Image (tube, coloured by chain):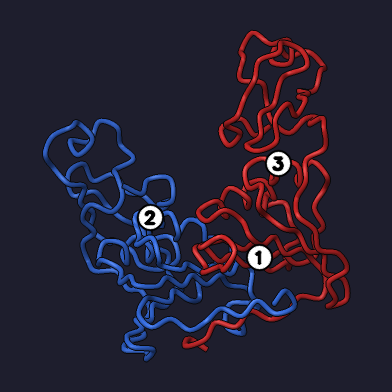
Chain colours: A red, B blue
């Protein structure tokens, strides 16, 4: 039991793999673990050896499928991540996280004078103006940003 | 691989089991994961079924043994936890966390006027004046406290 912590397979849920090592706790923050079902086991592995990335993190959550906004937030901070949806113990779908051309309501504009930061009923909105690495441009004030962790909405 | 996230046994390290469910991330904060070796895998399981507690969390850290202060901090927030030390794949020692009679440098006094909060070269110090549930009494100002999470040093 102690010698080998074997995490049982999940019937339904989501596995987020190939997360940039060290970012699993930020992914947990995006998922908002506190908001999940009281009986959903969440498993996290930080700094796991990975052939592809050298080191990676993994997050596995029972009884949860990610909203498109949460996938976008994960894609911004951990663009190498893959997301697998598990239903009835089977992998239904496995795909890299991917950004749409426009990101709405996921990060806040770093420009404090931007109209999206004035308490108006306006959601933040950015165009993806570069992809590797990602740069976003605010559709309201044209401010660009490339550091997303501190600005998650 | 996805169906069963099997966490490999660790050669050397620490398993903190029977953590009150929901407190694993606070235990991680006490451990200060960022300060560990860059090749230490950290595994966390949140809301795992447990016969004894109903639900529990587990934290497993490679290549780390906890300092007595960190054990005291864990004992304050998660008094049901057990700590197993693994050396060369064997459990060397398994014990419940336990509080000494005096707690030094682990939590700060909630009394802002306490001399231990005045920037003097004095470490916080508390007597354990009740054990179930734990109540601490500051040796300097006699302020009592029973909520430790917000006051971890």
Crowding near the residue tagged with mark 1, few <14, some 14–19, many ≥20 C-alpha atoms within 10 Å: many
Residue displayed at 57% across by 31% down: A147
Q: Vertically, is A48 above or below A113?
A: below
Q: Which residue is mark 3?
A: A73
Q: Are marks 2 and 3 on the same chain?
A: no
Residue displayed at 22% across by 66% down: B101
- Image quadrant assignment for residue A17: bottom right
Q: Which residue is mark 1?
A: A42
**Numbered disc 2: secondary structure:** loop
Q: Vertically, is B75 above or below A26?
A: below
- Kindly check if marks 2 and 3 are in contact, taking CB atoms under 8 A apart as contact: no
Could you tell me residue A143's position as x and y percent?
66, 15
Q: Is residue A129 left or right of residue A2?
A: right
- Image quadrant assignment for residue A51: bottom right
Could you tell me residue A110's position as x and y percent?
61, 20
Chain of the residue under label 1: A
Chain of the residue under label 2: B
The residue lying toward the viewer, choosing from A116 and B38, is B38
**Numbered disc 1: secondary structure:** strand
Residue displayed at 58% across by 69% down: B45
What is the distance, in whole Å, between disc 1 and disc 3 at their CAs? 19 Å
Numbered tag placed on residue B32 in the rendering: 2
Task: Name the image quarter holding the C terminus of chain A.
Answer: top right
Q: Is residue A140 left or right of residue B94?
A: right
The residue lying toward the viewer, choosing from A59 and B51, is A59
Q: Are marks 1 and 3 on the same chain?
A: yes
**Numbered disc 3: secondary structure:** helix
Could you tell me residue B57's position as x and y percent?
56, 70
């Amino acid at each position: 039991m102690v010698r080998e912590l074997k995490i049982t397979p999940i019937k339904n849920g989501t596995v987020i793999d190939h997360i940039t090592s060290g970012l699993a706790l930020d992914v947990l923050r995006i998922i908002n673990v506190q908001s999940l079902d009281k009986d959903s086991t969440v498993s996290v592995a930080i700094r796991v050896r990975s052939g592809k990335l050298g080191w990676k993190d993994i997050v596995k959550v029972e009884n949860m499928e990610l909203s498109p906004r949460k996938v976008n937030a994960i894609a911004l901070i951990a663009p190498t991540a893959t997301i697998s949806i598990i239903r009835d113990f089977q992998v239904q779908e496995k795909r890299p996280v991917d950004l749409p051309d426009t990101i709405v309501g996921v990060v806040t504009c770093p420009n404090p004078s931007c109209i999206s930061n004035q308490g108006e009923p306006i959601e933040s909105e950015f165009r993806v103006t570069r992809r590797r690495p990602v740069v976003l441009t605010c559709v309201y004030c044209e401010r660009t940003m490339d550091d997303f962790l501190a600005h998650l909405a």
